[in-house]
Image (tube, rainbow, N blue to C red):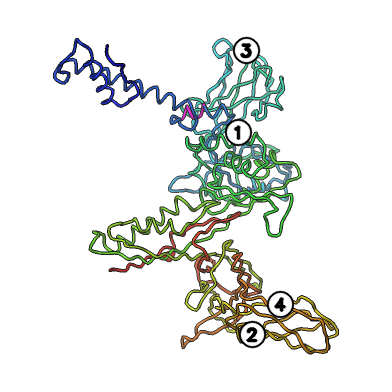
């Protein structure tokens, strides 16, 4: 008897070889030459068919699970079982102040109807049409009608009508014939039949627990070939259509993110006031540019978001609830960070804080933030919990690398090698940074640099400096707080905080171009002295004596009402690892204090260089640095002008650690347009 046929192998060659082995074991084919016979062709056909069927069945199995599915229709179908509907394209929204000048003194009101059209300025050579999605009416003020912050949306409103035939369409399923619709703009009305003109407005069903037998709702799903479909209830969950009903559907077809940033508009229609007078004299002033436009959800995004959305169960409670729900309903954001008010400094209880990084631009307008809160978050959030949206804080990296290489082992020129290293750094940025909750790991970045050319690069040393940017209020004296949100490295004479130039008045009233600079301090001096017991009955300032293993530290005590109010360090001294404080004299008794050695704080000064290239200080105590928290506090300073074209002052300082993690609304990034962001020095052996 022949051995059993092996069926575990799936590749073509192995299947064919197994068939040959099986036939060779049969007495009829002993010593048969399969390679040179016509039977070889039959074996090819059998092996090909077996391989094809194995592949086909394997793909069917893969398409049955959300994690392994590849086809969009399969992914959408699996997501549907989780109650998830992939988001469509989203239309950009702009706000304008729309004023109609009229000589009519009698017209009382004017309405901008739904669908009133505007035309935008050109973006990449293309002008986009914007429309209103609801009717707005205002009353006349003087001779003008002014529509403040009128929302307009990019796209074209289209209408379709379907007649329900129970026999032909028992599932009450209607396919919307446009693939580029914004599903959030869908409106559905139902007319009982052609002779009954009564119209019922149906709303999108979002919660089955709130849907009654007679609820006039419709459901939405993505069908085949990326076309959306609507369907209706069954008289158990939602009202069922009656045979012959006429379903009218209206929605916006949009170009999505292509129209973002449109900011100037003209009206392409006329208006008619309440007296029937046609109005054509319009003034349109933009309030906020078009934003929020996005493309429809991709397959990978559906696979990621559907399980997360399922866990929220249509409510906003946890951080992940907020993140997944906002991403689904406002897909124009690239990254979302959510934290509770208890994590704020100081804590603000009863508040959820959200930060959004848009796919385009750096920030979201204030009007758009309020819309996200009012239209997306509030309807699902817990009662009595408020939401605040903060702009992201960008922490810019300055990457400096010294690379040791052997030029004899590479065909690259120095410029080509530097470019390859730059591209490696940018690839690291693209993969690991530019989003919330990101982490820079210096060792991994150095590995990516070293493997750019493994033959020639022997090793590298990379230093990371961090940069914060702030825009001062020109001409106004005020304090500033700059928060790096990461630990900072205490400076030395050669490695310390610096800034880009700006102008201030010096002590004589002359304008000087200065910069911020860290004042290097001893690593082992007395930073401060804390009063433990203020004592009593002091009539004059007592003598403060500091003893320890260092030298040079001195301090002065200040007396208020016979008690020591505070002790000011006059000279920090050097080389202290331990120190004690003795208080004597002054006519009183009982006072005690302790010395704080090398506290993690520093000082900021403003300096400039005179005509002799000598450094001059305008303010030696312009601010302080908390190295642990990364907070720089600048005292009142009047800045007259800034040297940079964008109006920002840039502060650069070395990071304390090689692993930089972000918290709350901080995003680590690299400014590719900054020539100092990535610098490489090549050293030959």
Secondary structure under the numbered disc 2 in the rendered image: loop
Residue at image mark 4: 594
Instruction: Give the residue drawn at x 59%, y 16%.
Output: 164
Task: State which mark lies toward you, 4 or 3.
Answer: 4
Magenta span contains residue 75? yes
Mark 2–mark 3 distance (CA, rounded to whole Å): 95 Å
As measured in the structure, the alpha-carbon distance from the residue carrying label 1 to the one carrying label 4 is 57 Å
313 lies left or right of 399: right
The N terminus sits in image quarter: top left
Mark 1 surroundings within 10 Å by alpha-carbon count, few (fewer than 14), some (14 through 19), many (20 or more): some
Q: CA distance from mark 4 to mark 2?
A: 13 Å
User: Mark 1 or 3, which is nearer the eye?
Assistant: 1
Disc 4, SS: strand
Q: Earlier in the sequence, mark 2 or mark 3?
A: 3
Identify the residue under disc 3.
Answer: 243
The x and y percentages for residue 681 are 35, 68
Q: Position of residue 634 (x, y in %)?
A: 63, 72
Residue extending farthest to the front is 1
Give above or below for 101 relative to 548: above
Instruction: Answer with mark 1 or mark 2, whichever residue precedes in sequence.
Output: 1
Give the mark, 1 or 4, whose residue is nearer the N terminus: 1
Q: Give how far apart the Cα atoms at labels 4 and 3 are.
A: 89 Å
Residue 310 bears which disc, if any? 1
Q: In the image, which is nearer the foreground, mark 1 or mark 2?
A: 2
Neighbor class of circle 2 (other Cα within 10 Å; few <14, some 14-19, many 20+) is many
The magenta segment: 72-77
Give the residue number, with chain letter if any, for mark 2: 553
């Amino acid at each position: 008897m022949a051995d059993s046929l092996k069926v575990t192998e799936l590749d073509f060659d192995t299947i064919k070889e197994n068939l040959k082995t099986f036939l060779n074991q049969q007495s009829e084919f002993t010593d048969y030459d399969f390679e040179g016979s016509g039977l070889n062709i039959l074996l090819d056909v059998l092996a090909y068919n077996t391989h094809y069927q194995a592949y086909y069945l394997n793909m069917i199995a893969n398409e049955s699970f959300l994690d392994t599915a590849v086809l969009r229709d399969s992914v959408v179908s699996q997501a549907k079982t989780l109650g998830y509907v992939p988001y469509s394209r989203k239309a950009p929204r702009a706000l304008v102040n729309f004023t109609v000048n009229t000589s009519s003194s009698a017209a009382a009101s004017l309405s901008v109807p739904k669908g009133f059209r505007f035309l935008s300025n050109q973006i990449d050579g293309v002008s986009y049409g914007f429309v209103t999605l609801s009717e707005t009416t205002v009353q006349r003020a003087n001779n003008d009608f002014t529509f403040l912050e009128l929302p307009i949306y990019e796209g074209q409103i289209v209408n379709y009508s379907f007649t329900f035939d129970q026999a032909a369409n028992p599932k009450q399923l209607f396919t919307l014939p446009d693939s580029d619709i914004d599903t959030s703009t869908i409106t559905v009305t139902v007319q009982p039949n052609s002779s009954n003109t009564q119209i019922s407005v149906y709303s999108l069903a979002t919660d089955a627990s709130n849907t009654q037998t007679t609820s006039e709702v419709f459901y939405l799903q993505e069908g085949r070939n990326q076309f959306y479909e609507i369907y209706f209830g069954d008289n158990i969950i939602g009202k069922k259509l009656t045979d012959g009903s006429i379903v009218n559907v209206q929605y916006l077809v949009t170009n999505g993110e292509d129209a973002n940033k449109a900011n100037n508009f003209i009206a392409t229609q006329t208006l008619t006031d309440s007296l029937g007078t046609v109005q054509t004299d319009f003034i349109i002033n933009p309030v906020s540019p078009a934003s929020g436009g996005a493309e429809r959800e991709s397959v990978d995004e559906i696979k990621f978001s559907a399980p997360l959305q399922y866990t929220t169960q249509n409510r906003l409670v946890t951080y992940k609830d907020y993140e997944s729900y906002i991403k689904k309903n406002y897909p124009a954001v690239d990254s979302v960070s959510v934290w509770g008010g208890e994590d704020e400094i100081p804590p603000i209880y009863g508040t959820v804080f959200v930060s959004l990084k848009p796919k385009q631009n750096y920030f979201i307008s204030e009007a758009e933030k309020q819309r996200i809160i009012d239209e997306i978050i509030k309807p699902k959030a817990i009662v009595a919990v408020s939401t605040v949206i903060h702009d992201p804080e960008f922490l810019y990296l300055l990457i400096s690398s010294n690379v040791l290489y052997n030029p004899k082992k590479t065909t690259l020129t120095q410029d080509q090698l530097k470019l390859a290293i730059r591209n490696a750094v940018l690839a690291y940025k693209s993969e690991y940074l530019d989003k919330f909750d990101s982490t820079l790991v210096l060792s991994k970045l150095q590995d990516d640099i070293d493997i750019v050319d493994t033959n020639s690069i022997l090793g590298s040393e990379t230093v990371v400096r961090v940069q914060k940017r702030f825009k001062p209020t020109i001409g106004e004296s005020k304090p500033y707080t700059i928060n790096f949100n990461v630990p900072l490295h205490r400076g030395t004479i050669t490695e310390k905080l610096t800034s880009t130039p700006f102008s201030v008045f010096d002590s004589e009233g002359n304008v000087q171009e200065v910069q911020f600079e860290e004042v290097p301090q001893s690593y082992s001096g007395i930073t401060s002295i804390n009063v433990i017991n203020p004592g009593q009955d002091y009539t004059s300032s007592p003598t403060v004596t500091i003893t320890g293993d260092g030298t040079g530290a001195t301090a002065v005590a200040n007396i208020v009402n016979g008690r020591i109010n505070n002790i000011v360090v006059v000279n920090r001294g050097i080389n202290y690892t331990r120190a004690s404080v003795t208080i004597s004299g002054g006519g009183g008794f009982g006072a005690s204090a302790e010395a704080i050695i090398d506290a993690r704080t520093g000082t900021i000064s403003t300096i400039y260089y005179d005509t002799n290239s000598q450094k001059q200080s305008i303010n030696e105590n312009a601010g302080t640095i908390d190295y642990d928290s990364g907070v720089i506090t600048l005292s009142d300073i009047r800045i007259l002008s800034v040297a940079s074209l964008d109006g920002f002052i840039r502060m650069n300082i070395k990071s304390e650690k090689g692993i930089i993690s972000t918290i709350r609304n901080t995003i680590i990034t690299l400014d590719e347009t900054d020539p100092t962001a990535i610098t490489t020095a090549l050293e030959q052996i």
